[in-house]
Image (cartoon, helix red, strand yellow):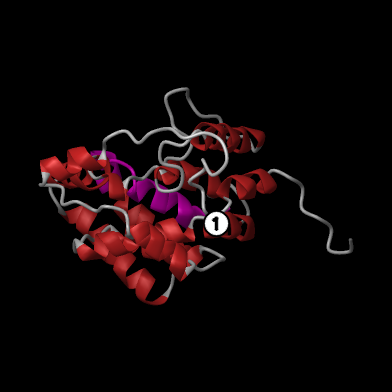
Amino acid sequence: MAKTIKVLSALLNYPTAELKQAIPELRGVVDGEGIVAGDASCTLDRLLDDIESKDLYDLQERYVLLFDRTRSLSLHLFEHVHGESRDRGQAMIDLKTLYESNGLAISATELPDFLPLFLEYLSTRPLAEAAETLGQTAHILSALAERLAKRGSPYEAAFQALLAIAAAKPDDSDVAELLQEPDPDPSDLTALDAAWEDEPVTFGPGASSCKDGIIARIRAARRPASSPNT
């Protein structure tokens, strides 16, 4: 179990008064486990300071502008992989099944690909398994980190911390492909509306927009690992 991943899940949820009050405890968890080190640790500490010190209303407004209003910063993982393709629904089912098969029940209103929920699940798994599964999303995390860095957002630190934990590092070509997608300014309402326009759902050969086999990897994660001696 990696409590630091649980901390990152909390930090990427909508800010609340309870979160602000818990910052000293969360900082103690991160420092105590020590699985995020070096520059990633320093920048994460600054994010903790930022959430602890800023006005709650300002924190909530910033969160909505970044993650709820801007599609390119969506915290729903499959938004960046499947878009509106038919595969997205099946991927949601597979991920929900993965959670439930490992004891994490979610409500009907929760989308399984919401990053804080995904991290909550990973925090219940052995660290090596969590790091391997997290590595499957490294290109998404890296693209989000770069977009947040462009905005000067302290939330970049959470994604750099996740990348530091992930077993696999992002493939540069996969990251570059994601960064080609529109990334409008949150204050540009026309551009935001255009970015959120429904994409056509495609069927048949070539319909899937999943370039990296994330569905197959999620399904594979549900299979028992092979014995080293086989």
Q: x, y percentage for residue 48?
A: 28, 58
Q: Nearer the viewer, residue 12 or 69?
A: 69
Q: State the residue position of label 1.
A: 136
Q: Quadrant of the C terminus?
A: bottom right
Inspect the magenta stretch and tell me whether residue 17 lies in it: yes
Q: Is residue 29 visible?
A: no
* Mark 1: secondary structure: loop
Name the residue located 45 percent from the left edge and 67 percent from the top edge: 173
Left-right relation of 53 to 44:
left
Name the residue located 51 percent from the left edge and 48 percent from the top edge: 210
Q: x, y percentage for residue 201?
A: 43, 32
Name the residue located 38 percent from the left edge and 33 percent from the top edge: 200
Q: Is residue 193 visible?
A: yes
The magenta segment:
1-20
Single out the residue that lies furthest toward the top. 108
Question: For the stretch drawn in magenta, what is the main secondary structure?
Answer: helix
